[in-house]
Image (cartoon, rainbow, N blue to C red):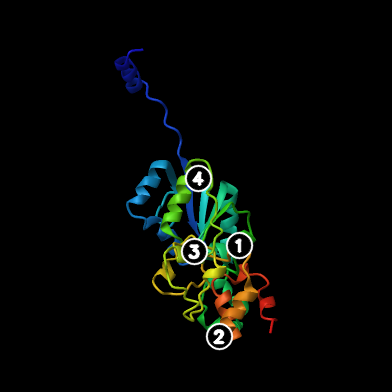
Amino acid sequence: MKPVLKKIKEIVHPKKAEPKLKVGIYGLTGCAGCQLSVVFNEDDILDVFEIVSITAFPFFKGHNIHDVDIAIVEGLVASNDDLEKLKEIRSKAKKVIVLGACAHTGCIPAYRKWTLKEDYEHLIYKKNKDIQDVDPTPIDAHVEIDYVIPGCPPNGKQILHVLKSVASGKLPVPNLKPVCVECRERGNKCLLLLGKPCMGPITTGGCDSVCTNSGFECWGCRGPSEDPNYEVFVRLLRNKGYEDDFIKTRLKIFSGLKRINIDEAFKQK
């Protein structure tokens, strides 16, 4: 067929466009900062809309279609309402990606596990009696998940990378290196050597070491790195003059529910 005739045929009988991946973005109990991280990608988000269809985003949209290929969920389970919503999301999604520290580790809300109720009871606001509290827990404590985008808030570039990857039919390989790797690649001075309680050695990287680049120690918001050595880390902070209560709080405040067996590290002399 002559090129001109082929072009005319394409115009008259265009190929049917490939259906876009249907994505839903949801929030449970949380600050909504992780959902905003999706939107705050500014012009880059337009690239995402070219390859996926955001069919559900209740935080911004009034009309939502909840049967999706990928559900991205922010927040933790802190009430029976959260749990019911999460189970419904899971039942209507082919894959579930958890977004941010609350969804991944339970984050700061889950720290109440190690806090006396009388210390925070006065902070609890009045609410509908039909909404019952449950122990604050990450999403994977209740439903099967397929991928994690960690962080408080998550890295915007990583969100885009994951969306582009799933649009091409695969999930990206998760980052298993600690924050220290990225920090040293950028030529930063080691904050532990400067006496700061930096959790970079035992925290998952992928954040571009954004905190330590500015001289602020890592607080561990991206969750534990692969095979963290808590005994050595506790000994290191003790040698820097930090008390055990301080070290325990720092270890638990962002990702305590995922840092199992850390109490064993404090039994050493």
Q: Nearer the viewer, residue 102 or 238?
A: 238
Residue at 43% across / 74% down in the picture?
216
| Distance in Å between CA atoms under marks 2 and 1 | 24 Å
Do residues under tags 1 and 4 come within 8 Å of each other at their CB atoms?
A: no
Q: Earlier in the sequence, mark 2 or mark 4?
A: 4
Percent of width and height locating residue 133:
59, 70
Residue holding disc 2: 242
Q: Could you tell me the amino acid type at mark 1? A: Glu
| Distance in Å between CA atoms under marks 1 and 4 | 24 Å
Residue at 42% across / 31% down in the picture?
17
Q: Nearer the viewer, residue 179 or 40?
A: 179
Residue holding disc 4: 166
For the C terminus, the image quarter is bottom right
Percent of width and height locating residue 135:
62, 70
Residue holding disc 3: 151
State the SS at label 4: helix
Residue holding disc 1: 226
Do residues under tags 4 and 3 come within 8 Å of each other at their CB atoms?
A: no
Q: Is residue 181 left or right of residue 146?
A: left
Label 2 environment density (alpha carbons within 10 Å; few <14, some 14–19, many ≥20): some
Q: Could you tell me the amino acid type at mark 3? A: Gly
